[in-house]
Amino acid sequence: MAMDYDICSDIVAGRAPTSVVHEDDTVMAFMTIGLVNPGHVLVIPKERFVYLHDLDEETGAHLFRITMRVARAIRESGIRCEGINLFLADGEVAFQEVGHVHMHVFPRFAGDPFKIDADWSARPSREELDEIAGKIRAALESKNRR
């Protein structure tokens, strides 16, 4: 995978064709050619951030605000839509293929081809969940002190 190649920056710069849904100073939303279903939109920060944790909170909040507006617009557009999925892949093992943060917003309907194949049967003990929560809480509190 070529995480160093960034088609999103080419799109923002006008070096690659795109069908724009929304654009402002911070983010851009456009149709993807690798769609799950018709109406599949990507929302990206215009500035290149490779991973979600690289974004500043203001940019991340704006990215999600526009994502919410795009999701509403998809539902109201007349495109076949019985539900919406949001998907953000963060890191290669999470299926990130482009080295630029991008939120997928796509309509869903009964019988469409999208599948999430996961084993949801794991049921850890409350003690294990508390231990993991404690580690995450400590990292979060450490970050808040910086």
Image (cartoon, rainbow, N blue to C red):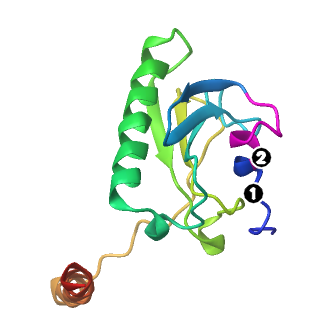
Find disc 1 in the rendering and name its residue.
Answer: 6
Prevalent SS, magenta region = loop
Q: Quadrant of residue 39?
A: top right
Residue 37: x, y in percent? 65, 30
**Is the residue marked by circle 1 packed among few (<14), some (14-19), or many (20+) residues within 10 Å?**
some
- Name the element at disc 2: helix
- Residue depicted at 77% across the width and 50% down the height: 7
Element marked by disc 1 = loop
Q: How many angstroms separate mark 1 from mark 2 (CA)?
A: 7 Å
Label total for image: 2
Crowd around label 2: few <14 · some 14–19 · many ≥20 (10 Å): few
Q: Is residue 10 above or below residue 6?
A: above
Disc 1 + disc 2, Cβ < 8 Å: yes
User: Image height check: is 77 above or below 116?
Assistant: above
Residue 99 position (above or below residue 102):
below
Residue that sits furthest to the top in the current view: 78
Q: Is 11 on the left-hand or right-hand side of 131? A: right
Q: Position of residue 25 (x, y in %)?
A: 50, 38
Q: Nearer the viewer, residue 7 or 79?
A: 7
Left or right: residue 131 versus residue 74 is left
Q: Is residue 90 above or below residue 106?
A: below
Can you say which quadrant of the picture contains the C terminus?
Answer: bottom left
Quadrant housing the N terminus: bottom right
Q: Is residue 58 magenta?
A: no
Q: Which residue is mark 2?
A: 10
Q: Is residue 56 left or right of residue 80?
A: left
- The residue stretch that appears in magenta: 10-18
Q: Nearer the viewer, residue 63 or 83?
A: 63
Q: Amino acid at mark 1?
A: Asp
